[in-house]
Image (spheres, coloured by chain):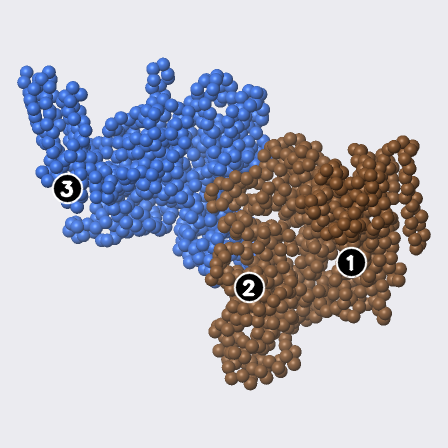
Amino acid sequence: MCAFLYSKVENLRVHFGLFMIVILPPLVGAQQISSVSPRTVIVGEPVELEFTGKNLGFSGDGDLVILASFPCRQEIISEEPKPPADGLGAQPRNKVRLKVSLKEDVQVGVGWLRLVTSMGITPPILFLVDDLPTRKVEPTTRRHDSVLLDPPLGIESKTPNLDVHYYKLKARSGQRIAIEVIGSRLGEDVDAVLKLLDASGRILAASDDEPGSGKDPRLAHVFSKDETAYIEVREVRYQGGKFYRLRVGNFPLPMAAFPMVAQAGIETSFVSVDSSGETSLSRSTRASGLYGTPSRHSLGFRGSEHNASGFVPLRLVEEPQFIEKEPNNQFSEAHLIESSVTLNGRLQMPDDVDIYAFDLKKGQYLHFRPFCRSLGSPSFLLLSLQDEKGRILASAGEGNSVEEPLRHVAPADGRVFLRVSELAGRGTPAYYYSISAHIQATPLSFHWDAGKAPHLTVSGQPGSTVTLKLKTLRKSFNETIGLTPFGDRGDYEVFGSSDIGKEKGNFDFEIHVPEAMKPGEWDLLRLRASYSKEGDTPQEWTDVLDFTSAFQNVLPNILFPPVELINRIPLFVMPRKIEVFLDPISGKPGDVVEIKVFLKKKDKSFRFLKPKTSWHGFPQEWKVPVKAQDLDEEKGFSILKLNIPKNAIPGGEIVVSASVLGELENARYMRVFSNKVTIELAGK
Amino acid sequence: MVGQIYMKIRCPVLSLVVFGHMICDGKSHVSFNHEVLPILSKQGCSQGSCHGSPHGKGHFRLSLRAFDPSLDSHTIFREELGRRINLIEPSKSLLLLKPTMAIAHEGGERLKPDGYAYNLIREWIREGCPTPVEDNQCVELEITPGESKLLKWPEFSLQLGARATFSDGSSRDVTRLAVFTTSDENIAVVDGSGKVTGNSRGQVAILVRYLEQVQSIRITFSRKPEGFTWKAPPAVNYIDDKVYAKLRLLHYPPSPLIADAAFLRRIHLDLTGLLPQAEVARTFLSDETPAKRSQLIESLLDSPDYAKYWARKWGDLLRLSRKQVGESAVYKFADWLERSISANQPYDDFARDLLTAKGSSLLNPEANFIRTTINAEDAMESTAQLFLGSRIQCAKCHNHPFERWTQDNYYGLTAFFARIKTKKLGNGGETFIWDAKKGEVRHPVAGRHVAPWVPDTGAFVLPPDKDRRQVFAEWLTKPSNPFFARVEVNRIWAALMGIGIVEPVDDFRDTNPPSNEPLLEELSRDFIRSGFDRRHLIRTIVSSNVYQTSGESNEFNRDDTRFFSFREPRRLEAEQLVDALGQVTGKPMNFYGVPVTVKAVHLPAPDLAQRNRSMIGDTEFLKVFGQPERQTVCSCERAGDAGLGQALQLFNGKLFHGMLTAGDSLFRKSLLAKKPLPEIVEHLHLSALSRFPNEKEKAIALAYLEKATDKGKALEDLCWAILNRNEFLFNH
């Protein structure tokens, strides 16, 4: 199977003010990773990872690449089923063991990983890059039977059903031990609770949800005497079978980094912020996204006294940073912001407010997107946009979302003020925030319903189309815009119109997979919107594709998915299984000629029902019927009769093509393009 | 001249009031507001069960306890075309004919013709039912005698008087207009004239109410029984001093101190909710260390079981249930409580955390307390009941009938919680809680905004964006707050002694005085001095002789129900009982949603499992024995009474039967292990009763077992008999 197939009936979600893109899954055997062990790669140390799943390429084809947020090298150690000795009749892999090596300078933290095989690209899974070695330790459910740990180390396990896990520690007086569970940050549906107990079972320290790590608990404890202590890990509801990684060592537990956002390619200094607001560790780095910006990174912190790193999320953007300075609690003290920036600040005391000013022209579209919880801060922001008289123009924060954006279209020229406060009026030096403030922001974004694309990828054979079903709902921008798909290899052609008219609610958007792409190649598909109207300033917005909700449908436990995964759709090029050929002809002006359209199947199991042919490239005055015609399957071809206009200029040529749209057995459609054919106009 | 002749002649046996009036200038002499309404209230006409109910009675509706004079004047004089009043012949007024039963009256006879109340109303009618706008408000009520009284037998009666002072500076005797009620009719009764007559030893509060003013007086009745001699062990700490002083005054000698076995069982149950294991009991009983009791107290206070059990007690009060807070938060909030108790978090800090919590209900589990409340009123009522020991709900619709809380007070307190907002984050039941910068409470009658108000301090003038909950919490937890420490001290005392110094524990009011005021005062002072250290308070109480007094009464203190001359036995709590049964039989009950090792007394919530018909036999046991559903903050939700259902459960209930007849029960395993029967019998007693069997018990048990052909069945019978003994079923 080699193309995109779509259901006849789409159950589209409606997103107010947004376009919705629906991509249907290919009929190829589903690429699926059911488990990976361990779930961690170690910086500077080769690790063997065992992937189990379905259709992880073909055994023996050797064609397997890790596509990840961190650069790595991989080598196949073993695979199942075993590759055929003669290289023939290879079976799809269901298990593959890889040796993965990372460089020393890879950031510790949570990243993501996909496997690219000869059969496609797997859905992403979140993965940990750690500098603590993974050790095999069997946890026990009885405290007194627990195994003595020798930190620093990481342990991977699954929570016991209706029970707790225990590990034993021997600590010296004055020794600091940091313990953290990593589970929900890896997208697992686990809400762990961590306790450090003394020998009699009393709680020495405990942790549940934490601002910097969400549902993943973590704690640090300095022992006041030599003693044996126990680590207790459980799922909060005692649910079993939930993956977790336990890190035990002496590492920092930063809540967030400040600034929480970095500008790509710019050397930036960061400090680690703990839950009390202390900024104990600092470092600087020049972050540049592997997959462009915006993207989500991890930033590790480690002091000289530590034997491992603690890490926090970091957002990488293209716009410059602005760091708030006090006092800015009143309009008269507001920071004037003149271009799109990322605002970084903190609410240092209860009821603290920060105020920013913007000079707007009528019709300018302002967009503020707060980042707090997703980057580890405990803040919940209340954003309020006010005019010079203090009247509230728009506000966000009281709705039922965690990081509620604020949008506003300036009704007139003038200055407006963004008032940033904490929703609950809380404030300490730990209450950091970051806000993407976009002046003349894109008024559009495209959400992808991944309920129909469970692998979060699209694939098609060279010469076919990838059809996206868009649903357009407009809020403040009512002009016609053009949409252009693009990737690392440049822009992609669109079959049909790429303009989205203001009157359109739903339409199909078909992206042509270039003939030049070879099976096995892949690209990261992005979307650019442009607006151009006489008298108005042309505008262009890249990365208008956003399928956070789609991502969360597929991986519901990842509250804040990596940004680069939610605006890039991997496009994988499949082997050809069906092709369309034209019988080339030539004719003179005034001739009646016939063109044969052949449908050629490379795989007999592939059934293309009720195919219809349509044509592209003919000059309008030739009056070639554009309406689809049935393709006679018995004959294996259909014929197009056409009259070459008498007034056609002899000696010239036109390049035309046909496409065949067919229904597959399961009532989905695929469009395959013919090779392009040049019609020569004979005569003089 | 406007005048009123009001002359009171008093002598020891006669109290005579001569009432008259004269009209010199045509103005009224009987005050509707100050006389007619109080007298209607005194006769019971305007009480809630009569015409004061929201819909009135017999189409005649008065405001509750004359709360709304303008409504009452309209109702009496104008409603129903004025048919209730006959200005020409006042005596023929329906208002007089009905309560004198001249015409049938469902409420019975309320007025005596020509009695004081009758004459007063008739006179008011005769004057034309004047209802002038009354600016002169009653501002103070004074009772004579002004202080608490101690009455010694045979002088068991006392005449009370009431005097009202008005806003114009005038004052008058209102004894005949005031309402008198007693807090305990078994101890003393009071008649309408204010005469108190004692019935038995004890202490009562007499409440005197006139218009919106309420006062009370405490009277102690002391009577020395024949043959009584005071005898008490030497005091260990101030608790003994205070309790013994009261007991001596009332002639209640304390019962003797308990033996080690009883102490071991009691202290384990009170501090951890669990029975001591048989081996623990054996070791403790054989230990001859003099300080072994205090060592045991320390080790139990330091144990994880203590933290879990006392966290569960707070779970009861904080409505901690899956239904109330959601599936994840129920565990998180329970964990938070356990951590708080384990770390011995100071009580003032604990209360502040609960009352001012903001943010995510998952990140800040303590915010679930506010989350469980429905609205500002509910938040205030719950807070008042938990931390002020006041059931203030009545004042929502009218001034509190038995307390000084007014409707203004109710809404003034509510104003602290008026700005609470919540939003659901849609992530595992997560809720975000915060306070808006605006939001006021509107008085339902006056229609105005009500400023935040607290007792003693009064109304607050706060900056508009001030965090009101913070202000309230600061006021509440101040050491000088007259309520805060006393309420928690009383709650802990009740948990350990079975009954509060104020009982019910969350119903502090003038008419429900503490049974031992100096004791409560000293405990509170000590609690505050210790930095609101609950572990210190518990240690102090359980170290006292009063706590370690026997559960058996003697001939002189048998009728003491309030003064702690003996420790009244109480039935094991539902969860304690289930755990105890499980321990003795070796077949502990398993619960949904927690590991098998989790005890009933440590359950995070009573509703972890959805109710399931197939599980009725198991869950019903706990319900039958009073496990609360945690729908309210009232400690009364946990039932401690006994009933037929409980008897049936213990007779042959599904759970109990299953434990006894299980093939792998502890005693059957012992039989299989060929342990000698005397050893099994001893173990059963140690496990169930924390003591060795006495010779008689041992002989009876062994005779029965040796005779039996099926030893397992016989042991079932023996176990059944032991587990049905009051000695097992009660914490004594």
Chain B appears in which tint?
brown
Residue A572 versus residue B215: which sits nearer the camera? B215
Q: Position of residue B106 (x, y in %)?
A: 72, 52
Crowding around mark 1 (Cα neighbors within 10 Å: few <14, some 14 to 19, many 20+) is some
In the rendered image, which quarter contains the C terminus of chain A?
A: top left
Left-right relation of B563 to A495 = right
What label does residue B185 carry, if any? 1
Q: Helix, strand or loop at disc 1? A: loop
Q: Position of residue B239 (x, y in %)?
A: 76, 58
Disc on the earlier residue, 2 or 1: 1
Q: Residue at x 62, y 41 (%)?
A: B376
Same chain letter for marks 3 and 2: no
Q: Are marks 3 and 2 in contact (CB under 8 Å)?
A: no
In the rendered image, which quarter contains the N terminus of chain A?
A: top left
Give the residue number, with chain letter if any, for mark 2: B621
User: Callout 3: residue from which chain?
Assistant: A
Q: Helix, strand or loop at disc 2? A: helix
Give the residue number, with chain letter if any, for mark 3: A602
